Amino acid sequence: MSRTMSKKHLLAGLAAAGVLGVGIAAPTVAFATDSPTPTPSAGSDQGADRQQQRADRQGEFAAALAEELGVPTDKVTAALEKIREQHRADRPARPSGEDRQAALKERLAQAVKDGKLTQEQADAITKAVEAGVFPGPGGRGHHGGPEGTGN
């Protein structure tokens, strides 16, 4: 009989996990847009287009949430903006590209000192980062170094 109870508990657990999975996936699907991916435009228009699209999606989300909760859209929008501002304030400042490069060089120097790397290996890593082989300080996908678009 205990074996039958174990199967029942297992099935109940699986059903609960399925319901939880749907509960987690539903908001993710709500964030998805049905519009096709925009084609990139030249210059600063691309940034403005992205900002406008993001604002439109956020507005649609706020309206849907307001309707679901039965509250005015402007109240939901204000609450979401308040939470965004709190998150921005709580987020630590990102170190500059120069600070990250200096930290990398310090870590490499320590690895050489500890015998984990040779100086040639450390130099090769530094050269690879500066050449954009790795994302990060000076690498592709980062806006803070020589290969990036920020400096």
Image (cartoon, rainbow, N blue to C red):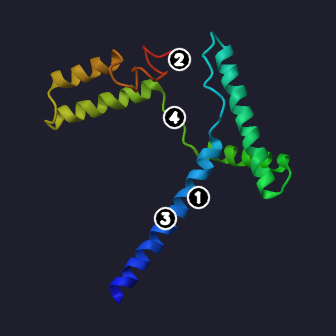
Q: Position of residue 1 (x, y in %)?
A: 35, 90
Is residue 142 toward the left or the right of residue 114 in the image?
A: right
**CB-based contact (under 8 Å), mark 4 and mark 1:** no
The local crowd at label 4, few if under 14, some if 14 to 19, many if 20 or more residues have their Cα within 10 Å, is few
Name the mark nearer the viewer: 4 or 1.
1
The local crowd at label 3, few if under 14, some if 14 to 19, many if 20 or more residues have their Cα within 10 Å, is few
- In the rendered image, which residue does mark 2 sit on? 150
Type of amino acid at the residue the image marks with label 3: Ala
The local crowd at label 1, few if under 14, some if 14 to 19, many if 20 or more residues have their Cα within 10 Å, is few
Q: Position of residue 49 (x, y in %)?
A: 69, 21
Q: Tell me which numbered mark, 3 or 4, is placed earlier along the sequence.
A: 3
Name the mark nearer the viewer: 2 or 1.
1
For the residues marked 1 and 3, what is the alpha-carbon distance in whole angstroms? 10 Å
- In the rendered image, which residue does mark 3 sit on? 17
For the residues marked 2 and 3, what is the alpha-carbon distance in whole angstroms? 45 Å
Type of amino acid at the residue the image marks with label 1: Gly
Name the mark nearer the viewer: 2 or 3.
3
Query: How many marks are shown on the rendered structure?
Result: 4
Q: Tell me which numbered mark, 2 or 4, is placed earlier along the sequence.
A: 4
Is residue 52 toward the left or the right of residue 145 in the image?
A: right
**Secondary-structure class at tag 1:** helix
- In the rendered image, which residue does mark 1 sit on? 23
**Secondary-structure class at tag 3:** helix
- In the rendered image, which residue does mark 4 sit on? 94
The residue at the point 76 percent across, 45 percent down is 62
The residue at the point 37 percent across, 83 percent down is 4
Which one is in front, 51 or 31? 31
